[in-house]
Image: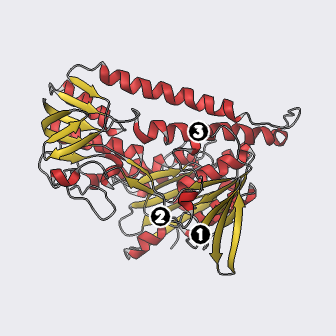
Amino acid sequence: MEYDAIVIGAGQAGPSLARRLAAAGRKVAMIERARFGGTCINTGCTPTKTLIASAYAAHLARRSADYGVTIGGAVSIDMRAVKARKDRIVEVSRKAIEASLRGTENVTVFHDHAHFVSAHEVAVGQSVLSAGQIFVNVGARPSVPAIPGLNACRYLTSSSIVDLEEVPRHLVVIGGSYVGLEFAQMFRRFGADVTVIESAPRLIGREDLEISEAVLGILHGEGIAVHVATHVTGVRQINDELVVDVEDAAGARTITGSHLLIAVGRRPNTDDLGADRAGIALDQRGYINVDDTLRTSVDGIWALGECNGHGAFTHTAWNDFEIAAGNLLDGETRKVTDRIMAYALFTDPPLGRVGMTEVEARKERRTVLTGSIPMEDVSRAYEKGETQGLMKLVVDGDTREILGAAFLGTSGDEAVHSVLDLMYAKAPYTLLRRVVHIHPTVAEFIPSLLDGLSV
């Protein structure tokens, strides 16, 4: 069967691109082997942020007396109801994506596994489809390390833990980065004892030191045990207990829990794609090599989303769609390198991060100026009773360019967009110094941060 375009994978980039191509009169085959919506809708953003909202409600209920509100009795968690709420929200989004694709003129949906049989032929089920343009949007999945004994034990990943219907007695998290920390705090607020094990010297090591230390303080404040510079040497299951063997500077010991979460990164879903038969070049980790316009090593084949290694986020996948559509359909010249790095850690309080860290900027031998303020000095945070964290800006003193920002605090994941927008506008930081923000908000303190810049 011949098509003008084939889109493999109905994650964030694929469906939107299929609809744009179809609207332009192209005959499109849209292939998805599992659940429409990809990671974000099914096991990532939508379910985790829904669960985090439930955990926040429990946390706030426990703190109600701080606000002069009395709740009779202890706060209890109905994990089945929590999961059911999550499932309802996920299902609405998933069904909407599938229905939209099936209802789009010029789009034919195939619900089966796809793999290349040649550069421009894709097998799906018992059929072979061909097209001059093929877009790969197959995403990624949790990586499971080769820990001795792990394969003989029951364990959870970020994909499976969202379906728990009970609160673990003691959740042990291997991995002290973004995904692991969100689940650690979430399940602590649901009532579990939680232990985090991280092999690096500190949590979220790509952040500046004060940000890492502040996040550690937040977790410690909620009763989460954190072990950094600690290596896992093995895992054993003894009846219903999971025994994790670890080693640190003090020597070997064990950590025992009822549930184990592996949160040590992700790997691309290119194992069974047949990339070799198409001649598509992969890197050593299995990610698809692409150029600045998302073209692969094969003419007429593009890779979008997490499988290309240029962003493990929904917003970067969406931008990949925009780059491909803009270049192919709108006569634009759009590139991956036009994108400014931005992401969030959705703990409570959240961390909003854009651009460079201070360490990264100093490595480039720039004239670095920084400004920071603790959230306890931000009136909105103080009034809300949520004063943990800090805001930090990094500026080039010569060019007056904002290089990066880290806002760890209430509404930090929203307020940081004021900085990101200015960075995209390539405007000097002095412009933001003169902005009059609404009081009382978190963003109103950004000009104050810029007024306090120092070497």
Q: Amino acid at mark 3?
A: Asp
Name which residue lies at 31% across and 32% down: 15
Task: Decide: is 267 above or below 230.
Answer: above
- Element under disc 1: strand
x then y, percent, for residue 125:
26, 33
Name which residue lies at 47% across and 47% down: 418
- Camera-side residue of 56 and 68: 56
x then y, percent, for residue 249:
65, 81
State how far apart marks 3 and 1 are (Cα). Answer: 25 Å
x then y, percent, for residue 168:
70, 47
Evaluate whether residue 148 shows in this view: yes
- Element under disc 2: strand
Tag in front: 2 or 3: 3
The residue wearing badge 1 is: 232
The residue wearing badge 2 is: 394
Name which residue lies at 23% across and 49% down: 274
The residue wearing badge 3 is: 163
State how far apart marks 2 and 3 are (Cα). Answer: 40 Å
Name which residue lies at 85% across and 40% down: 65
**Marks 1,2: beta carbons within 8 A:** no
Q: Amino acid at mark 1?
A: Val
The N terminus: image quadrant: top left
Find residue 186 and name its label: none
**Marks 2,3: beta carbons within 8 A:** no
Q: Amino acid at mark 2?
A: Val
Question: Mark 1 packing: few (<14 Cα in 10 Å), some, or many (20+)?
Answer: many
Using residue 152 as the reference point, say whether residue 122 is left or right of it.
left
- Element under disc 3: helix
Task: Decide: is 283 above or below 307.
Answer: below
**Label whose residue precedes the other's in the sequence (1 or 2):** 1
State how far apart marks 1 and 2 are (Cα). Answer: 36 Å
Question: Mark 3 packing: few (<14 Cα in 10 Å), some, or many (20+)?
Answer: some
